[in-house]
Structures are given as C-alpha cells and as structure tokens.
Image (cartoon, grey):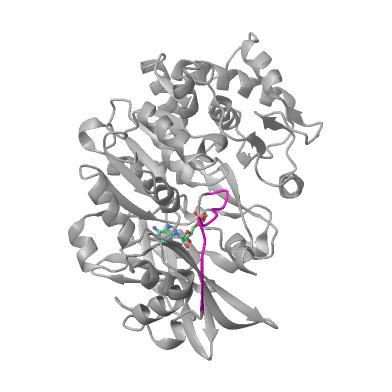
Amino acid sequence: MNIINVMKENALKHPERIIYEQANDLINHNADNFLTWGQLWEYSGKLAEYIKEHTMYHNPIIVLGNKHPYMLVCFLACMRAGHAYCPVDVSVPEKRVQDIIDQVDPEIILCTEELALYNERIVTLSSMQEIVNHNYEISDAQLLAGDETAYIIFTSGSTGVPKGVKITRNCIENFVEWAESLLPADVADKGLRFLNQAPYSFDLSVMDTYLALFTGGTVVALDKETQSDMKTVMTALAASDIDVWVSTPSFAEVCLTDRSFNKETLNHLKMMLFCGEVLSNKMARRLLRVLPDVAIVNTYGPTESTVAITNVTIDETICDRNESLPVGVPKPGTIIEIQDENGNVLPENEKGEIVVIGDTVSTGYWKNEEKTHAVFGTKHVDGKDVRFYRTGDAGYISEGNLYCSGRIDLQLKLYGYRLELEDIERNLIQLPYIAQVCVCPMERNGKVVSLTAVLVLAEPIAESDLRDRIRQDLADLLPSYMIPKKYVSVDYLPLTLNGKMDRKAIKGMIV
Ligand code: AMP
C-alpha cells in the first residue's frame, strides 16, 4: 500500500466529494472554506511542483496554520514532492515556533494564516492560491519512499526544548490500516464524516485526518475560535452530521457539560474514538447513557508510535468490572511489554514501564541522537529487527488488556511513600459531586510537601464543608498519605493546546 496512491484513487473516484470543511462554516452557510477531493489532488500536485522547483535539499517543510483547507493541500504536496512536513499550530508561542524553525531549518515554510512572524522562507496563503492557479505540468512520480519520514511532530521535551518525532510513510500506513478496521463496518466506504478537534500539530489529528484520507471520507474541522465557545461548538456539531468523533476525553468532557450534547444533536454519530489521556469510568458511563447507540472506543499510544496502538470498546460490563478502564489490546504488528527498571519483562498483572515494539514506532527524534538513544532501540522479533520505544508510562497487562497507571514521571514521593497523582484523581472522580479534578503536588525547596486537589464540582457545596466531606469520603478509598490536604473549587480546568488537562496552568491557578 502507498497512502499517496490511495488518496489519488479516492480523488479520481469521488472528485466532487468534500474532503475538508469547517464546522463553523456550516453554521454560517459560508461555502468558501471547503475543499473537494478533486481540488485536493490537483492543488497538492501543483504545490508539489512548486516545492520541487524551489528546494535543493530534502529537509522537512514547516506547515504553519490552524484549521484551513490548504493545510491538507500542504501536507500532501510535501509528500508528493518527497519532503516530510512538520505541522505547527499558530497558537504555539512565537519563541517556540522559532525554536522549531531553527531545529528543522526548512527551505520553505508554508503558511495558511496571516502572521506577524516574518521569515523570508514563508510562502503565504495568497502565494499558494496563485500557485494552484498556475499551469503546472504535474508529475505523478512517487518521491517519498516507505521508510522515509512523512511527517515530524514536535512534542514538549522535559528540558523545555521541543523534540521532533519522525514518522515514516510506512508507520502511517500500518497505523491507518489498523485504525480503519475499527470503523463501523456497514458504513465504511460511504464517505464517513470525521470530527477533527485536535490541532494538526498534535498527532491525535492524524487519526481523523488520515482515516478520512484513507477511506475517501470528509474531515469536519473545529477551528480554534469555535472551540472557545461551547454554544457555538454545539450548534456546529448539530450542523455537521459527523459519523465518527475523534478527540481527547477532556474535550468531550467539556462538551458533556452542555445539555444539547445528546443523540438529537449528534444524530449521525456511530463511534467515538478517544486517545491522549485517561478516559475515566465515570465519563464513559455518562457517554453510554447520553449516546446509547454510539460505540465508545478507548485507544492508547504516544506520538512516538504513531497516534495509537491499542483499542477496546467500552460497554457497561467493562465499566462494572474495572474502576480504571483498560486501554485495550495491541494492534496487529505491535507487541507491548511491561518492563522493570532493568529492562526485564514482567509477567501479567505486574506494574512496570510500557514498552511498545512494532511497525509504527518512530525512527527517532529529529537531529537528536542522544534523546533517540535514550528511549528508542531495536529488538529481534521473529527473525526481524523491530523498533521499540520506552514510553515512560506505567502500566500492566491483565487478561491480554493493557491498563495505564499514569506517567512514571508523575510518580512522586510524599512522606517517603511512592504515589501516583493519577491514582488519587481516579478515586476523587468517583465521588458523585466531583465533575473534574487535578491533583497538584506542592513543593518547598524542590521537595513535595503536600497535595492540593483542584476541582470542578458537579453540584454546589459550601467551600467550608468541602474539605471535610471529601476527606471523609476518601478515607474509605485511599490510605491517608494519599488524601490531599487542600481542596480548591474552580469553574473550569484549563486545557492545553492539544485539549489535554493543563497541569502547569492549573497549578498556576492556586499558587
Ligand atoms: P502524546 O504523545 O501527546 O499523544 O501523549 C501520549 C501520552 O498520553 C501517552 O504516553 C500516555 O501517557 C497518554 N495517553 C495516551 N492515550 C491514553 C489513554 N487512553 N489512557 C491514558 N493515557 C493515555
């Protein structure tokens, strides 16, 4: 399989079908911001010719923007020209964008938004519009080999300098072949409509975008502005007829606070695919109640192994049996090992570090040998060398299902006890009057001295009663050293640009 050929076949088969539209335009009846499959193929071919003419090396190309139909044109154009693309969202602070530009050193930066940032390598949206109207002779030569890097996504590094994860074309293809197998069988190939919530700089977006590109479907994107107002999100969702939802659990959790998030609003919805952070038992139950005919699928994986590598469909029985939901079984082509700190493989039910071995593991970090060697390697499996990645996630396997137990780096010592913040959060969220929670370690002189829980309440409780009530309820669930000392109730928990809980910003709310 070559994903670029698959896209070409889809474009030839359904040239008039829409590949990209924006949910906010559906409300405004604005027909400017959509792209058909035919346009995607033609425009990306012309832009690819421009790229070939204007580059001497095969360095990656940065694609800077938020949600715009030309984002997909740019991604495909880069690949057709034999370059990797590197998506960077416009909401990334300028200093960080500059860090990424310095690291990648692109010959061209394709930019779909008007930006203050000046760089002589930028090709603006209006230039791209001229390019796609130009009479280029489009070549169909395949320039991106399967083992070459197709995209680079920068993730936050622990040192504060972003790390570029290199994903090959083969990785995308191995991922999307499996992801397609998760889709509802009876509607595949009918042009499914996929919700795109995540920015393109977050690899969760690869799930919806490549599923649409692979199956000849449509991406319905929620732009940054629309996402900032829940009422607009709901109106946009009602107008969007999406079949498959892809988001972080946190984004869906915020949606669930709106009464109109229900089967009448989402009347086409067949499946919700979650990835990127914990899907809580409580939230899964609420979804099963509100959207009884929708398949709720939990998936797990880091950017370093191409979006996701496990899946499980969550139902009432799984919720009843598991306080913390499983993330599922590995996809074909992937093995998951649980290892101790010396790299020994642990048996079922023993907790250790999750190590991913398989055909979607990245070839490493862009120009960062040291960090690459620290976490990537190869292992001999069935006579072949297969790449592995040490995730830094803690977890265990039980009856073939993987369970995540948080980040190894979110494990900390308090009064000499080892504890996991996410473990405490899982217990707090079980309390019926708590809607959302984040536990923050409070430090003095670099040492954790106490825990503070920041909460969104599901029902009003007087601030003066809160601490005693929670501590009393938690006493049946947790040892005393794990029970937070302080409780702060807030209206909402801020999310990161990627739609995950923003622990740093939340801590900033209380100190
Ligand atoms: P990212 O590379 O930004 O996609 O983040 C990957 C990390 O998100 C993983 O290493 C996990 O720590 C976490 N993660 C992803 N999916 C899940 C899930 N279903 N449940 C719990 N944590 C998850």
In the displayed structure, 399 sits above or below 137; it is below
| Residue at screen point 65% across, 10% down | 134
Q: Locate the N terminus and report the quarter of the image it occupies.
A: top left
Q: Position of residue 319 (x, y in %)?
A: 24, 62
In the displayed structure, 382 sits above or below 175; it is below
Please indicate whether residue 71 sits to the left or right of residue 341 in the image. right
Q: Residue furthest bottom?
A: 416
Q: Magenta stretch containing residue 500, yes or no?
A: no
- Given residues 419 and 175, the one toward you in this image is 419
In the displayed structure, 62 sits above or below 341; it is above
Q: Main secondary structure of the magenta part?
A: loop
Q: Position of residue 41 (x, y in %)?
A: 50, 20
Residue 381, picture quadrant: bottom left
Q: Is residue 138 visible?
A: yes
- Given residues 157 and 345, the one toward you in this image is 157
| Residue at screen point 50% across, 54% down | 500
- Given residues 252 and 431, the one toward you in this image is 431
State which region is magenta. Answer: 486-498
Residue 460, picture quadrant: bottom left
Q: How many marks?
A: 0
Q: Position of residue 414 (x, y in %)?
A: 53, 86
Q: Magenta stretch containing residue 487, yes or no?
A: yes
| Residue at screen point 74% across, 31% down | 56
Q: Is residue 216 visible?
A: no
Q: Position of residue 232 (x, y in %)?
A: 47, 33
Q: Locate the C terminus and report the quarter of the image it occupies.
A: bottom right
Please indicate whether residue 149 sits to the left or right of residue 206 in the image. right
